[in-house]
Amino acid sequence: MIAGAALLFFYGLAASAGTALGMTAQQKPEIEITVLEKKIADPTPQGLTLVFVLSVKNLLTIPQVLSRYDYRAVIEGLEYLNLQTALDAPIRIEGREEALLALPIKITYDYLYAVVPALKGRDQAGCFVSGGMTFQDDRGREKRAPLSFSGEFPIFRGIEIGLLPIEARDLTVGGADLVFKASVGNPNGFSFTIDRLSFRLELVGVAVKEGVAGQGAEVDAHGEKAVAIPLLLDFFELGRTLYDGLSQPPAAARLVGEVELRSVWGTFTFPFDRSAKVAVAKIS
């Protein structure tokens, strides 16, 4: 299957009031399904998962067992998925109790563009889900509670880490006062804040610093932000090879780590490993 979903069971809770589904105007509700949260999980340039966290309440006094579910996912008016799934491990909800379930819908961009070509170049899309959950009681009698909800998701294009020229305030055979800079590029249609950029920096093959940088930096949609890493280097400790490489640029640089960013779609962490030869520019 190119894209699909599995229903995940979280935990049971005492029942509480909410919006009722699975009833007509003449019936009292028996199973109540509401959307508690919509979130994005595991975004990559290849796709992501749109997760609907559902509250499923058994308003009856007798247990109900969720045995199967079906749903149709429509994106921008075109059918993306149409699934019917029987649960290998049915979920039992006791009378007057609640279960929290996650319905994850895997979005694979290659498949998405094949189904909805108009989304190429767009920054986000909408998804409408309809279907139902089928329950059985202890006597095997079935009832179906309908599903109907919608959510949006971004077209995620990754995060771009670049290595910029080194600024040298002072560079002698004994040591150096430098500022190393990395760019954080945002090719996406939403802005984000850098909560932390954890890194290990190597220059000319020598590890010169580990730490955290960039906290609180705002990066606009389709924008870029430079993150500065100050360096005070002692060449008597780190070696003459490092001095020679920096004094005869371009110098080999490698930045390894992960960036944690916060956006309207959630908080995500992405690893990076970038190597390049960079210029060393003397500044006063």
Image: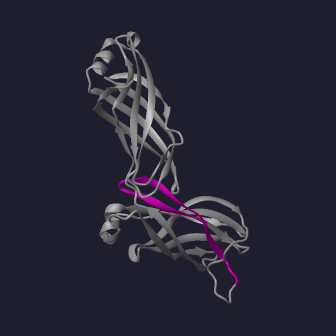
- Magenta region, main secondary structure: strand
Residue 29 located within the stretch drawn in magenta = yes
Image quarter of the C terminus: top left
Return the x and y of residue 152 as percentages of the image width and height. Answer: 48, 66
Task: Identify the coloring.
Answer: one colour
- Name above or below for residue 26 compared with residue 284: below
Q: Which residue is drawn at the image coordinates 64% and 77% (left, top)?
A: 139
- Name above or below for residue 176 compared with residue 152: above
Is 227 on the left or on the right of 172, as rendered? right
Please report the bounds of the magenta region as a residue range.
28-54
Quarter where residue 247 is shown: top left
- Furthest toward the front, the residue is 284
Is 110 on the left or on the right of 152, as rendered? left
Q: Nearer the viewer, residue 258 or 135?
A: 258
Return the x and y of residue 29 as percentages of the image width and height. Answer: 68, 80
Q: Nearer the viewer, residue 231 or 76?
A: 231
Return the x and y of residue 257 as percentages of the image width and height. Answer: 43, 35
Is 14 on the left or on the right of 84, as rendered? right
Image quarter of the N terminus: bottom left
Q: Nearer the viewer, residue 169 or 189?
A: 169
Q: Which residue is drawn at the image coordinates 38% and 50% (left, top)?
A: 158
Residue 44 located within the stretch drawn in magenta = yes
Return the x and y of residue 255 as percentages of the image width and height. Answer: 38, 32
Quarter where residue 125 is shown: bottom left
- Name above or below for residue 272 compared with residue 236: below
